[in-house]
Amino acid sequence: MARDADTIQADIERARDALAVTVDELTTRANPKRLVEQGKQTVRARLGDPKIKYALIGAGALIGVLIVRRLFR
């Protein structure tokens, strides 16, 4: 069954609109500034966890003690 030109034109316009929406979404998702900000938020959230926070403080203190001990030997 053959389609008329108006139907084909309407299909093309719908496809073009859908593609434009998809491109806009991809542009938003792939924005480097947004990705960096999201990464910062993730790191801050993880470092805010007391288990990780105190483990890092302990590791830093241990490294500091080892450096001071090595300097005064």
Image: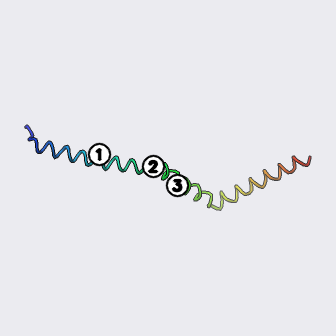
Circle 1: element type:
helix
Q: Residue at x 45, y 49 (%)?
A: 31
Please tell me which residue lies in front, 69 or 54: 69
Say what amino acid the circle numbered 3 marks. Glu
Whole-percent x, y for residue 1 in the image = 7, 37
Which residue is label 2 attached to? 31
Which residue is label 1 attached to? 19
Return the residue found at the far right.
73
Which residue is label 3 attached to? 37
Please tell me which residue lies in front, 47 or 71: 71
Return the residue found at the far top.
2
CA gap, disc 3 to disc 1?
A: 27 Å
Horizontal side of residue 37 vs 58, given as left or right: left
Considering only order in the chain, which callout, 1 or 2, is on the residue closer to the N terminus?
1
Considering only order in the chain, which callout, 1 or 3, is on the residue closer to the N terminus?
1
Say what amino acid the circle numbered 1 marks. Leu
Horizontal side of residue 31 vs 72, given as left or right: left
CA gap, disc 3 to disc 2?
A: 10 Å
Tell whether label 1 touches label 2 (CB within 8 Å). no
Say what amino acid the circle numbered 2 marks. Asn
Tell whether label 1 touches label 3 (CB within 8 Å). no
Whole-percent x, y for residue 12 in the image = 20, 43
